[in-house]
Amino acid sequence: MKFSLIKIEQFSGERSTFYTIQLEDGVVLFDEFLEENSKIYEKELKNITQRIRSMANQTGAQEHFFRQKEGKPGDGVCALYDQPKSKLRLYCIRYGNAIVILGGGGRKTTRTLQEDPKLDKENKLMRELSQKITVRVKAGEIDFSVDELEFIGNLEFYD
């Protein structure tokens, strides 16, 4: 799978940096999430983007903003939502309070995400990407900046 990590300048600040993923076909996962949900969930998306801006500039990406354990133990896959009981999920990979990779997601209407084909696909994609990024970090091909707010290294994946 070929993909690149892309820094989202408009959602990056002094407290945390947000990235998204561009797939080889040109699809940018966070942009696709916004487009797919903009008509029906305008208010929820506005709340999510405000929360992202707040994390970037004021609070950092604190754990309580995310629904944890959306992937396998240790992979960092979690979900961002507009309010705690909200059904709109944005799957992310969180690296402490400083770096978050925004993926895709959608409305959760089933008891488990595995029962929803779209959410299951989005979640599995983020888990797969997390594994590939982890391999690069462990190999020293991707590192963190001195302030730990940015990735440094090869952010393009061609395997």
Image: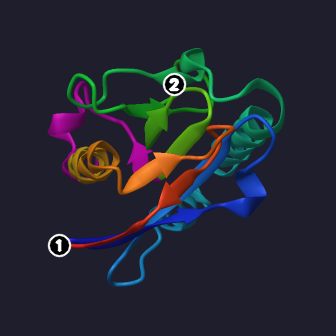
Task: Give the CA distance from mark 2 to mark 1.
Answer: 30 Å
**Image location (x, y in percent) of residue 102:** 50, 50
> Is any part of residue 109 visible from this angle?
yes
Q: Amino acid at mark 2?
A: Phe
- N-terminal of the two: label 2 or label 1? 2
Q: Is residue 121 magenta?
A: yes
Crowding at dot 1, Cα within 10 Å, few <14 / some 14-19 / many 20+, comes out as: few
Q: Which residue is mark 1?
A: 159
Q: Amino acid at mark 1?
A: Asp
**Image location (x, y in percent) of residue 99:** 57, 40
> Is any part of residue 88 visible from this angle?
no
Residue 6 vs residue 150, the one in the foreground: 150
Q: Quadrant of residue 56?
A: top right
**Image location (x, y in percent) of residue 115:** 16, 37
- In the image, is residue 49 above or below residue 5? above
**What residue lies at 47% left-to-right and 61% top-to-bottom?**
153
Please give the count of numbered marks on the rendered protein.
2
**What residue lies at 48% left-to-right and 34% top-to-bottom?**
95
* Region rendered in magenta: 103-122
Residue 28 vs residue 35, the one in the foreground: 28
Lateral position of residue 154 relative to residue 74, left or right:
right
**Image location (x, y in percent) of residue 14:** 81, 40
Q: Report the quarter where the N terminus lies.
A: bottom left
Give the structural element (helix, strand or loop) at label 1.
Answer: loop
Q: Quadrant of residue 127?
A: top left
Query: Which label is found at residue 66?
Result: 2
Kindly give the residue lying farthest to the bottom in the view shown. 25
